[in-house]
Image (spheres, rainbow, N blue to C red):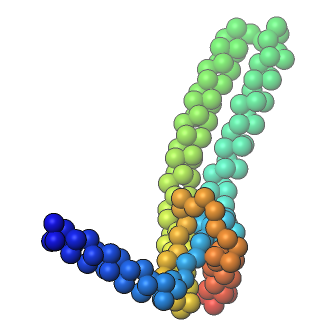
Amino acid sequence: MCLKKFVVGVSGIAALVVVSVCWAQQPKIGYVNVVKVIEEAPQGDAALKKLESEFGPRDRQLRVTGDKVKKLEDELEKNELVIKESERREKERELRDLKRKLKRQTQEFREDYSVRRNEELRELEKIVHKAIVEIAKVDKYSLIIHQGVVYADDTMDITEHVLKKLETARKSTK
């Protein structure tokens, strides 16, 4: 019984010491809306432009092929009654082949674009993470959170600070 009181007493004193140390240190906590940072970061715009220059020509080629399909469909429909049977079959085969080609190229394009977009996004996430860690160290934050937050006071939101840091970093790398 006496040992039990002693353990409870020591546990209570230890809890008070931990609470008082934490209270005295006043931990600095910040919140970052990482989704907003990724959407608005200048490095994100650069990544989009990079993807556009890389995939723009293929996208334009797919549109040209799509226009050819549409034109051939219209031609077949328009001349359905006056075209020879052999010529119609040839045009239908050509149309079917063109549609297959377009479908295959579109699927390949989407897959390739998705892979590259994910690569660029991962790179951007690394840059954002590095900026957040640098801000945490320089401004002496004890904790910075970004997910699972139900509410964060505006005084804790450092999203704009992170965006400014990324803008500064972007300008210095140009």
Judge left or right: residue 43 versus residue 111.
right
Q: Quadrant of the N terminus?
A: bottom left
Quarter of the image containing the C terminus? bottom right
State the residue at coordinates (61%, 36%): 102
Compared across the picture, whether 55 is left or right of 116 comes to: right
Query: For residue 90, which quarter of the picture?
Result: top right
In-image side of 66 versus 108 (left or right): right
Which residue is painted at 50% across and 65% down in the image?
A: 122
Query: Between residues 67 and 28, which one lies in front from this camera angle?
Result: 28
* Residue occupying image coordinates x 27% and y 76%: 9
**Front-lying residue, 49 or 156:** 156
* Residue 43 locus on image (x, y percent): 63, 74
Q: Is residue 67 above or below residue 154?
A: above
**Residue 50 appears in the picture as rendered:** no
Q: Position of residue 7 (x, y in %)?
A: 21, 72
Q: Write the residue at 38% across / 80% down.
A: 16
Q: Which quarter of the picture shows residue 86?
A: top right
In the figure, 16 relative to 139: above or below?
above
Q: Residue furthest front?
A: 1
Q: Position of residue 73 (x, y in %)?
A: 75, 23
- Residue 139 appears at what percent x and percent y? 56, 90
Looking at this view, is 169 or 27 the one in front?
A: 27
